[in-house]
Image (spheres, rainbow, N blue to C red):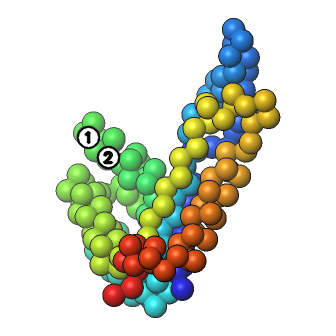
């Protein structure tokens, strides 16, 4: 059995306004909604948790005694830290990232990336173009579109033996 971690990026806001006969997203609304899913074999769960903990032990000393959010491994935190480091400043948030340097951030990315290869994860990314969707007479919710498509993909993966082989989930 595969276990999936699912995460969202962007907002689900589909507010629109008519501008010279064309529907546009409301000012400030993000044009994309992204849903990503990473699947691992259930037998790998404890090993992956151990490997992630070891990476965090190296990169965030003392993380086990801090609030989880201080050292959460999250793409937006990586991006913010990278921007600040590139401009000669230290990362601000979350607090656990404050001591990271450019080489630290690169090492953290490489270490986490190696886990995808080691455990042969299945990865899906669904991108909803909200700018296109709002052109419909009755726009569908971005979140609903993304989750429906993800469910379809997972069902196909589950019921197609060749997909499992192609995804290389099993040795």
Residue 69 located left or right of residue 122? right
Where residue 9 appears, x then y in whole percent?
54, 49
For the question of whether residue 103 can be seen, the reply is yes
- 113 vs 80: above or below: below
- Which image quarter: residue 169? bottom left
User: Tag on residue 27?
Assistant: none
Where residue 168 appears, x then y in whole percent?
37, 77
Q: How many marks?
A: 2
- What is the secondary structure assignment of the residue under circle 1? helix
Disc 1 target residue? 86
Residue 154 located left or right of residue 163? right
- Mark 1 in CB contact with mark 2 (< 8 angstroms): yes
Residue 133 located left or right of residue 104? right
**Residue furthest left in the image:** 103
- What is the secondary structure assignment of the residue under circle 2? helix
Residue pictured at 73% horizontal, 44% vertical: 141
For the question of whether residue 57 can be seen, the reply is no
Please tell me which residue lies in front, 48 or 71: 48
**Residue furthest right in the image:** 138
Residue pictured at 34% horizontal, 71% vertical: 116
Dot 2 alpha-carbon crowd within 10 angstroms: few under 14, some 14 to 19, many 20 or more = many
Quadrant of image for the C terminus: bottom left
Where residue 106 appears, x then y in whole percent?
24, 57
Dot 1 alpha-carbon crowd within 10 angstroms: few under 14, some 14 to 19, many 20 or more = few
Please tell me which residue lies in front, 89 or 130: 130
- 58 vs 76: above or below: below
User: Tag on residue 82?
Assistant: 2
| Mark 1–mark 2 distance (CA, rounded to whole Å) | 6 Å
- 37 vs 140: above or below: below
- Which image quarter: residue 149? bottom right
Quadrant of image for the N terminus: bottom right
């Amino acid at each position: 059995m595969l276990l999936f971690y699912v995460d969202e990026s962007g907002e689900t806001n589909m507010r629109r306004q008519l501008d010279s006969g064309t529907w546009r997203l409301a000012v400030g609304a993000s044009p994309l909604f992204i849903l990503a899913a990473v699947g691992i074999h259930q037998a790998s769960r404890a090993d992956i948790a151990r490997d992630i903990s070891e990476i965090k032990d190296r990169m965030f000393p003392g993380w086990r005694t801090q609030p989880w959010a201080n050292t959460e491994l999250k793409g937006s935190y990586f991006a913010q830290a990278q921007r600040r480091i590139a401009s000669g400043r230290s990362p601000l948030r979350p607090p656990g990232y404050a001591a990271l340097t450019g080489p630290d951030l690169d090492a953290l990315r490489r270490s986490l990336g190696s886990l995808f290869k080691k455990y042969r994860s299945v990865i899906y990314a669904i991108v909803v173009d909200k700018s296109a969707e709002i052109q419909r007479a009755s726009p569908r919710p971005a979140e609903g579109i993304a989750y429906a498509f993800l469910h379809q993909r997972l069902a196909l993966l589950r019921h197609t033996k060749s997909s499992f082989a192609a995804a290389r989930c099993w040795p």
